[in-house]
Image: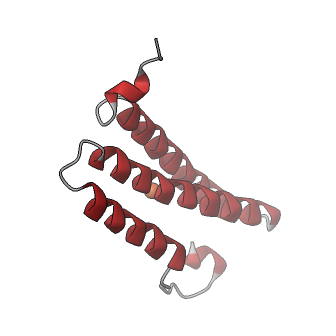
């Protein structure tokens, strides 16, 4: 991506993701040994995916507006991977991690 726009790649701490990680650590402390632990951690993983979906979606739109076709393709490929991961986490959350959550109330 950086090569495409002719800028040097550099890293930057993401405070939003740091916050989601801190929340996941709270869940681990609070639900350690509980059957709810996996469901709680899946919710944290999904929060990360949703954040990534938002960011890649925005970047894809910006790349499109600037006519950066190759960048649009790269960003869309990553966006699709994030959407797929989100769906897999939903399936996991609704089945193995929280089987009662997938059943309809009687
Ligand atoms: Fe992801």
**In the image, residue 101 above or below residue 10:** above
The x, y position of residue 28, in whole percent, is: 28, 61
Return the x and y of residue 12 as percentages of the image width and height.
Answer: 50, 85
Quadrant location, ligand no. 1: bottom left
**To which quarter of the image does residue 63 belong?**
bottom right
Q: Nearer the viewer, residue 34 or 61?
A: 34
Which residue is depicted at the point 44% across and 75% down? 18
The extreme top residue here reads: 106
Q: Is residue 76 visible?
A: yes
Q: In the displayed orientation, state which residue is furthest to the right.
A: 65
Q: Is residue 68 visible?
A: no
In the rendered image, residue 104, in percent from the top left (x then y), is placed at 47, 17
* Quadrant for the N terminus in the image: bottom right
Above or below, 11 against 99 in this view is below
Q: How many marks?
A: 0
Answer left or right for 66 relative to 32. right
The type of colouring in the image is secondary structure
Residue 44 drawn at (x, y percent): 42, 56
Q: With 87 as the anchor, is 63 left or right in this view?
A: right
Residue at 49% across, 56% down? 47
42 or 29, nearer to the observer: 29
Depth check, front residue: 23 or 56? 23
Looking at the image, which residue is at 29% across and 31% down? Answer: 96
Which residue corresponds to the image point at 38% horizontal and 37% vertical from the top-left?
A: 93
């Amino acid at each position: 991506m950086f090569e495409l726009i002719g800028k040097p790649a550099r890293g930057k701490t993401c405070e939003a993701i740091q916050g989601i990680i801190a929340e996941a650590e709270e869940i681990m402390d609070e639900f350690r040994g509980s059957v709810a632990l996996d469901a709680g951690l899946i919710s944290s993983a999904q929060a990360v995916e949703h954040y990534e979906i938002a960011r890649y979606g925005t970047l894809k739109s910006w790349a499109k507006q600037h006519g950066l076709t190759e960048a649009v393709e790269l960003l869309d490929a990553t966006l699709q991977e994030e959407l797929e991961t989100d769906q897999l986490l939903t399936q996991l959350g609704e089945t193995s991690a929280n089987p009662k959550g997938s059943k309809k109330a009687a």
